[in-house]
Amino acid sequence: MKSIKSIIPLICALIFTYALNRSWGTTPPFGKLLSPFHGFWVNAENPETEEASLELLKIPGLQGEVQVIYDEMGVPHVFAKNDHDLFMAQGYLTAKDRLWQMEFQTHFAGGRISEIVGEKGMASDQFQRRMGSIYGAEKSFEGMKEDPKAEEALNAYSDGVNAYISGLSERQLPLEYKLLDYKPETWTPIKSALFLKNMSFVLASGTDDLKMTNILRKYGKKVAEDLFPNYPFEESPIIPVGSPIDFKPVPIPAGPADFTGLGSSMMTPEKDPNIGSNNWAVAGNKTVSGLPILANDPHLTLQLPSIWYQMQLVAPGVNVYGSTMPGTPNVIIGFNKNIAWGVTNVGSDVLDWYQVKFKDASKREYWHDGKWKKTTLRIETFKVKGKENFVDTIFFTHHGPVVYLSHEKPFRSNIPVGHALRWIAHEKSQEMTTFFQLNRAKNYDEYKKALTYYSAPAQNFVFASNEGDIALWVNGKFPLKAPLQGKYLMDGTDPAADWQGFIPQEHNPHVKNPVRGFVSSANQFSTDPSYPYYLGWQYAPSERGRRINERLAIMNKINMDSLRGLQNDNYNIRARKVLPLLLAQVKTSSPAQEKGLAMLKTWNLQNAPESIGATIFENWVLYLQDAVWDDEFAADEKVPMNRPALDRLIHMMEAEPQAVWWDNVKTASKKETMQDMISGSFVASMDSLAKKHGPMGPEWAWYKHKQTGVRHLIPGMDALSRLNIPIGGGGSIVNASTTKTGPSWRMVVELSKEGKPKAYGVYPGGQSGNPGSAHYDDLIDTWAKGELRSLLYLENPDQKSNRLRKKIVLSSK
Amino acid sequence: MKKKLSASYQFAVVVILLVVGAIVNVYLPWYVMGLVFAALAAVLGLPSGSGFRLGFVSGFLLWSLAAVLVNVQHPSSLPERMAKVLPLGGNVIALYAVTGLIGGIYGGIWLWAGARLRQKS
């Protein structure tokens, strides 16, 4: 008895220790985490001193010595003796600052989040894999390996990451591993492919085919085509109207027969549509320096750690600086001695759905081209934390994966059930080769050649060189389609509905040294309708593009600072058009509403951070669109539909005041007019603002209403995020900062004849992924203020600068 | 049966635990400190009555002071952020206290367990 009693404390101690050594659901392992010798405390990093320091690190596998010099922003400048060492160092150094993020993002891309967070990650994981993320990465990896240089880069990068991982002790693990209680696994080259393919998910997975088909089924083709036109009323396309076509188009396929399909149902949340970007290059005759200047700001989800990581990579044949994407070799957006380049997304339609007719419940055969054809199967295994493995079977037709079977509930509302997915992201591709060559390109011809390897996600590649050239290629692999093919769901049994090959790459829309003296893109239509091929019917709204083009057209004596100003332009070109139309119709009754109208009438049309007019206008337009369209296009949540674009609504205000759509069909007894809708939505919008922020006053400031935040990758981790950032702009503004998305990297590069480009940049984050580092979020304030940092472009490792901090020498000995 | 420990003896025990605890923590996984505390309690023949108390005091002091020391040597915003994650309203003093408390209970429970084991034999 006594001996049992004396054992009890030991059992208590063991249970206590066990319980605090592991995580319970989302509760972290408190013992391990709080220990000041092992836990998060250890992750605190000293701010750097101005004194230069030198450190030697041994990395087995390096062929020579690599010198790494960090500047005051924490940017590593890497000097290697060959490409192998350069990429190995890139992998090692990126992992040193961003290991957790690299692994988490590739886990997400590969549908493996449930391995970390358990069952609640399953739906997202299954969606990723059903969409073919791993399948696509495998295909892409095959393509990458066909270029020996790309393969060498991938392998060396991977070895570098692993060299860092293998040198990590448990107490040195990045904070997030300690919070979520897991450990990094070995990096593999295919993870780089997964990351790049995930960019197609982020940028080229938008699909409205289902919603358009639901509209087609309810209202017929005439209404669908009238409300969802295939070119906007107001547009300023990327390739200037009237640009000559320097190729002979191939024949356009006949296209499929009309098909209405079954449509589909069920509702789940959708992703943010505000992802876009701006870029432009201005010719030397418009600049102070006499040489081109290039600017780029890709708009992505604002996240911490940042999606971008700055680096300078130097080896024989290359000296490139720019933003890299943690997880992949090379610089993605940047410049070298001779050229600069940047990207924005192309909204072309590269994702289509085919309604599948299976022979029977076994789904082993499907009907196509008058025959039963065999499906192929792919087995995916999910290692769910704290649960049994889950095994899933994906059925493929020749189009691609059947993402959801007819009885399944889709993860997002725009994904049809019972349809096979044809998607450019499943093609074999060589994006790595494009970036490898761009990093080393010296002139327009080398840039042009680099682009021929690129497939997806299609980008507007803007270019400028110190030979004086500016250019822009709308570049990627585009399916060769009949006009409007794939605007709606298609018939999977009809061979004429299949993609009929691809547009030859040299026929992609492009422009070099146009007369107007600049090239630009902001996700709007690539070309006007005279371009011989069909690329898509719907692009991002044209406001940013129109504003950029009207500014660049009149700007002269351009320098870095004036382009920085344009990147931060808050002018609301939409309001310039819409506000007079609204004010002409609105009728108000209360003093509070009168006050709101007076505010709008004196508003300078700037979406400035403190602006109250911007808040009232933006909110009103949202309410107006809800009021006009929701009765017809959001009546049944099980039949998701698109809502006509604002561009179409503006046309309705101007030209169709009697349109049937003004009436609210839910009020059977009353027939609402345009004036009723405009006034009613103003009142409702003002009431909602008063309810949210109190009586009109400083709390109505645009930035307080908009709530731009840079959020940590773990959802809900506010303590590691920066919220309520005082920044203006908005979705249709050049300064495209919205609640969750915005300019994720701003860069301006002034080229120089002598090969000494002057470049400036900033991103909303910091070089380090460690919340315990001063470099975790130190660039956010600079970004919010609209300022840029000068980027240090070194020519050799011994160059002197008062911005240099610690130096690390990497070698295998 | 009950041993009365003098104040200086108790002080000496705490100092030993602090020194040994610090060394073990620096070089070995976090859970080793408990085993070492239990072994020390058995070796020193500590009475189980004061085992928990002495272990708690040592564990509390060791963890909270080490946390303070780390934060002084490597000042960063991390403790404040973590004091929001946990959630302690961003109060770093509270975070020191919670760190000390976990270290204290951990040290106490193992010292007590070790003392009881010795008494058995």
Image (cartoon, rainbow, N blue to C red):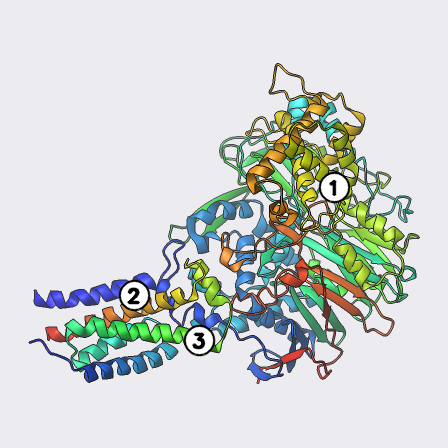
Q: Give the residue at mark 1.
A: A541
Residue type for callout 1: Pro
Q: Give the residue at mark 2.
A: A17
Q: Earlier in the sequence, mark 1 or mark 2?
A: 2
Image quadrant containing the C terminus of chain B: bottom left
Q: Are marks 2 and 3 in contact (CB under 8 Å)?
A: no
Q: Position of residue A570 (x, y in %)?
A: 74, 50
Residue type for callout 2: Thr
Report whether mark 2 lies on the same chain as mark 3: no
Q: CA distance from mark 3 to mark 1?
A: 52 Å
Q: Give the residue at mark 3.
A: B70
Q: Secondary structure at mark 2?
A: helix
Q: Disc 1 is attached to a residue of which chain?
A: A
Report whether mark 1 lies on the same chain as mark 2: yes
Q: Disc 3 is attached to a residue of which chain?
A: B
Q: Nearer the viewer, residue B69 or A198?
A: B69
Q: Would you place residue A509 above or below residue A643 in this image? A: below
| Crowd class of label 3 (few under 14; some 14 to 19; many from 20; radius 10 Å) | some
| Crowd class of label 2 (few under 14; some 14 to 19; many from 20; radius 10 Å) | many
Q: Position of residue B89 (x, y in %)?
A: 43, 58
